[in-house]
Image (cartoon, helix red, strand yellow):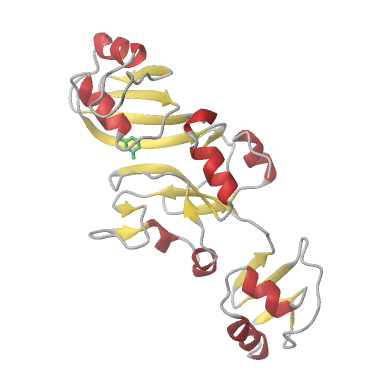
Amino acid sequence: MQLDRILQSQGFGSRKECRKLARDGEVKVGGEVITDPFAEYDENGFVFEVGDWEWEYAEKVYIALHKPIGYECSHKPAHNESVYHLLPEPLVARNVQSVGRLDVETTGLLLFSDDGQFIHAISNAKRHVTKTYRATTASPVLDTQIAALLSGVSLDDEPEPVKALTVNKTSERQLELVIDHGKYHLVRRMIAAVGNHVEQLHRFGVGGLSLEDGSLPELEVEDWCYLRPKHLALLGYEP
Ligand code: URA
């Protein structure tokens, strides 16, 4: 594929802008500046640099972000920063979307992709991809509350009671729970429904991926990484 087409496909701008990037000496391949925008390369496994960034060609990208508090999962947030500002511009330009959403106040693992099939597969309720949350509560966690979360709580706009798959009390006011639904404010609403209140919420796992068990590279808050095939396999997804 021609260099300008490769750059365009990876989110570096229009064909014209990508030709200019090359002509301006901004693009390197194997450490060498390539000013010919029409130079041909095999795009598979193609590694190049634009400015100070090293990039690897990918037909589709899959990303994990450690979301900080105070960021909205929206391109045009009303009152907060956007999670998309935490990703490099070329990734946003190629239209990656978050896989579901986390509330502004929720921290933790958030996935993104420009592969619509992947987004659909991971967010599709029928696939039952698990999400693991740590909730810090306002009042001590009671055994009756744990039992109610496990047996299912009725929520206003849900036709059926919603159950947590597992619930572990990890300290007096903290519990970890696994759910396989992805509805709006679900964990906060479930915990409110059993008579407690979430003060902090952190999602540390999605499917077989966790921020805490080495299944992903270590991600500090605000850091992101690419998901490789082994990570996608842990989500039960094969591109
Ligand atoms: N449940 C919530 O209440 N908030 C989230 O961000 C995710 C799940």
From what the image shows, is residue 182 above or below residue 62? above
Q: Is residue 55 visible?
A: yes
Q: Quadrant of the N terminus?
A: bottom right
139 or 117, which is in the foreground?
117
Residue 53 is situated, as x and y percent measured from the top left of the image, at 60, 70
The quarter of the picture where residue 139 lies is top left
133 or 38, which is in the foreground?
38
Residue 236 is situated, as x and y percent measured from the top left of the image, at 63, 33
173 or 132, which is in the foreground?
132
Callout count:
0
Query: Which residue corresponds to the image point at 38% horizontal and 17% vertical from the top-left?
Result: 168
The quarter of the rendering in which ligand 1 is drawn is top left
Query: Which residue corresponds to the image point at 63% horizontal and 90% vertical from the top-left?
Result: 24
The quarter of the picture where residue 108 lies is top left
The quarter of the picture where residue 159 lies is top left
From what the image shows, is residue 83 above or below residue 3? above
Residue 211 is situated, as x and y percent measured from the top left of the image, at 50, 39
Residue 81 is situated, as x and y percent measured from the top left of the image, at 31, 60
Query: Which residue corresponds to the image point at 66% horizontal and 36% vertical from the top-left?
Result: 233
From what the image shows, is residue 142 above or below residue 217? above
Residue 70 appears left or right of 90 = left
Residue 114 appears left or right of 59 = left
From what the image shows, is residue 50 above or below residue 17? above
Q: Is residue 220 visible?
A: no
Q: Quadrant of the C terminus?
A: top right
Residue 24 appears left or right of 125 = right
